[in-house]
Image (tube, coloured by chain):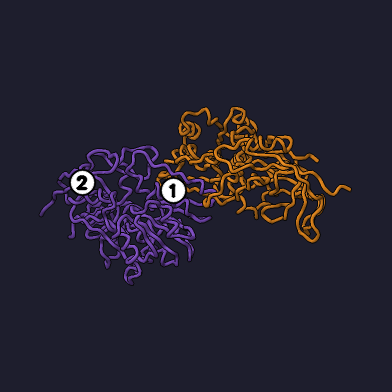
Chain colours: A orange, B purple
């Protein structure tokens, strides 16, 4: 009986400045014991799918006191992120061999984790693709759900703008907004993505921000009556343009600012006085403050998927060795839909 | 019997760029009929006190579509603002000769107004200085009350930072926060104002922002455990420094951004990604959305004034001819306390 296995890992060479490059990452191979220590409550998992998420960029930078949402990665060590995994051995009373879970694991073939509520979730529903638990049914989906319903205070008939709209979070936000009877416009960075928004996700309109010399004019064209809700994923110049086009009492849910994560010096945002003139609410949020609503979310979203009311697009990279390329590509908008890395299909 | 009177007025010569100057204003003298037209519901008032408020700067600029909170002044015409006035003649059923009111009037000795709810308020309590209705008991007081209780979501023991803290709004916000059991720090632009904050208004600490080369370091010194609530009156660099020092789930009530009103190009704010990391809520608000709470506010604040629990400092300019100087001085921080212009003491 085999008691050890080789364990390929993706490590961060050193803290990253600017855009991450594939060469910022390395591969190592260690050996992992295929059992958990006697008396420990840890769980050995085999990682199946890994999730590429924009927030991971903030973990690659040298830690600063003011950016404490997620801990920085340790240079020389494997990076970590959300993934879907199968339990191989368990010392934890809530997990049995064979169980599936999603949550934070290492970027490696096998991880030893100590299951923690709000960080690890047992997968109960397996009649959907397992990879969905890195996106639509996992952290990004829950982010879209909490951000839209809990932060945006949406009402039927309102106008909703979603940036990075074809991404893991954006595509669901747009569909939730349409289900509520809102007018929904999304932006993305290629014709292919814009087409996806209009034809597959049912956005009322969409534009390619890279082809708009004047973002404010593009928003004015799409929202002649102004924007009631902005689901913010990008920051910087886009936020400035949005502020000019917001309606009185508009709401901006700040989910992310991917355009800023790779800049050493953040872009200045100049139109903040509109916050007063228009009595705008800007609310930053983090999904882990809302995980208590996760089972409610599943009750809502699983039937929607099965009935075809909610659509989901993934961009799948095959093999852990493709991980760095997939992760780096995220910050250049190379992915079309949710970026997933398949480690093992079992 | 006199049926007309001369009516001195302060007019705006032309739209203002940059800081307003006394020479941007002019004086004219017209004649006013000391009665209201037969059958009209207008009211002729004699203006006693006029209020200098930062938002008036936004009305001096050439109108832009995105800054629609208050209408631009008309060049060549008298400017207007909040004031306290005595009714001389009334065609309006709710107002009698001799009544006092506060609300929007012209910068002139006599105004003919059409009383409008949310714009004009009858003064019922005259056992306090009438000029207080331009400040503590008027728009700025109501702004502080609504901004603090309705927008900041304050809790006992929280840390509160107020900029422009010795101004009409700031001085009350600080005192309300102290009454709630918060730790309160204010900033202002002179030693005299800083002393006022500490000795008269009971702030726990205060600093002169003009003498701090590093605003973020000043805030860190005053708030070693971070800021829970920021009452924003100034914008720009101060907001950037505050964002670095906010606590998770902090709230920023955006009342004004006086540092930006005189700039043709607004300063860029660079630290907005803290909104995500710290799940900050930034809420712009305007007092006129809260005037339905005005009588509740008076019920609260009048006893506080009489019992000495709330203190109030005014900076009084004597005579309408001093109006432009007083108004212009506001944008250089020359006023110590609420800037009032006395038109007539009766």
As drawn, A155 above or below B94? above
* Residue at the disc numbered 2: B10
| C-beta proximity under 8 Å, tags 2 and 1 | no
Q: Nearer the viewer, residue A301 or B195?
A: B195
Residue A80 can be seen, yes or no: no
The furthest residue to the right: A1
- Residue B223, position as x, y percentages in the image: 45, 60
The answer to which image quadrant residue A157 occupies is top right
Task: Find residue B331 and report its horizontal and vertical position in percent.
Answer: 29, 49
Q: Which mark is residue B240?
A: 1
Q: Which residue: 23% across, 56% down?
A: B49
Crowd around label 1: few <14 · some 14–19 · many ≥20 (10 Å): some
Which chain hosts label 1?
Answer: B
Q: In the orientation shown, which residue stands out farthest toward the left?
A: B1
Looking at the rendered structure, which numbered label has been put on residue B113? none
Image quadrant in which the N terminus of chain B is located: bottom left
Image coords of residue B341 (percent x, y): 22, 55
Q: Secondary structure at mark 2?
A: strand
Q: Nearer the viewer, mark 2 or mark 1?
A: 1
Q: Is residue B204 left or right of residue A219?
A: left
Kind of element beneath mark 1: helix
Q: Earlier in the sequence, mark 2 or mark 1?
A: 2
For this view, does A216 lie left or right of residue B76? right
Q: Does residue A325 show up?
A: yes
Residue at point 72%, 36% (across, down)? A321
User: In the depicted view, which residue is nearer to us: A247 or B204?
Assistant: B204
Question: Where's residue A204, x and y in %?
Answer: 57, 33
Tell me how far mark 2 sits from mark 1, CA to CA.
37 Å
Crowdedness near tag 2: few (<14), some (14–19) or many (≥20) residues, C-alpha within 10 Å: many
Please report, as a chain letter, where disc 2 is located.
B
Would you say A304 lies left or right of A46 here? left
């Amino acid at each position: 009986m085999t008691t050890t296995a080789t364990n390929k890992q993706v490590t961060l060479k050193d803290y990253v400045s600017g855009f991450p490059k594939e060469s910022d990452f390395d591969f190592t191979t260690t050996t992992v014991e295929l059992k958990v220590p006697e008396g420990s409550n840890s769980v050995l998992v085999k990682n199946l799918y890994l999730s590429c998420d924009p927030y991971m960029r903030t973990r690659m930078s040298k830690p600063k006191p003011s950016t404490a949402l997620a801990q920085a990665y340790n240079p020389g060590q494997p990076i970590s992120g959300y993934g879907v995994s199968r339990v191989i051995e368990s010392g934890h009373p809530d997990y049995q061999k064979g169980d599936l879970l999603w949550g934070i694991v290492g970027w490696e073939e096998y991880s030893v984790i100590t299951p923690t509520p709000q960080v690890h979730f047992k997968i109960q529903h397996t009649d959907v693709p397992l990879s969905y638990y890195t996106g639509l049914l996992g952290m990004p989906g829950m982010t879209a759900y909490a951000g839209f319903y809990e932060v945006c205070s949406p009402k039927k008939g309102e106008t909703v703008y979603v940036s990075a709209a074809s991404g893991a979070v954006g595509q669901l936000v747009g569909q939730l907004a349409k289900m509520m009877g809102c007018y929904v416009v999304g932006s993305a960075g290629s014709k292919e993505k814009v087409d996806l928004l209009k034809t597959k996700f049912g956005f009322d309109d969409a534009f390619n921000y890279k082809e708009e010399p004047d973002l404010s004019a593009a928003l004015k064209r799409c929202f002649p009556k102004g924007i009631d809700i902005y689901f913010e994923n990008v920051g910087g110049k886009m936020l400035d343009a949005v502020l000019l086009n917001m309606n009185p009492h508009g709401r901006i849910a700040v989910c992310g600012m991917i355009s800023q994560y790779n800049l050493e010096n953040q872009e200045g945002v100049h139109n903040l006085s509109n916050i007063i003139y228009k009595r705008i609410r800007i609310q930053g949020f983090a999904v882990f403050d809302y995980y208590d609503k996760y089972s409610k979310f599943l009750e809502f979203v699983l039937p929607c998927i099965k009935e075809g009311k909610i659509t989901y697009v993934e961009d799948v990279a095959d093999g852990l060795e493709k991980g760095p390329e997939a992760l780096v590509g995220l910050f250049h908008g190379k992915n079309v839909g949710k970026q997933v890395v398949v480690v093992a299909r079992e």
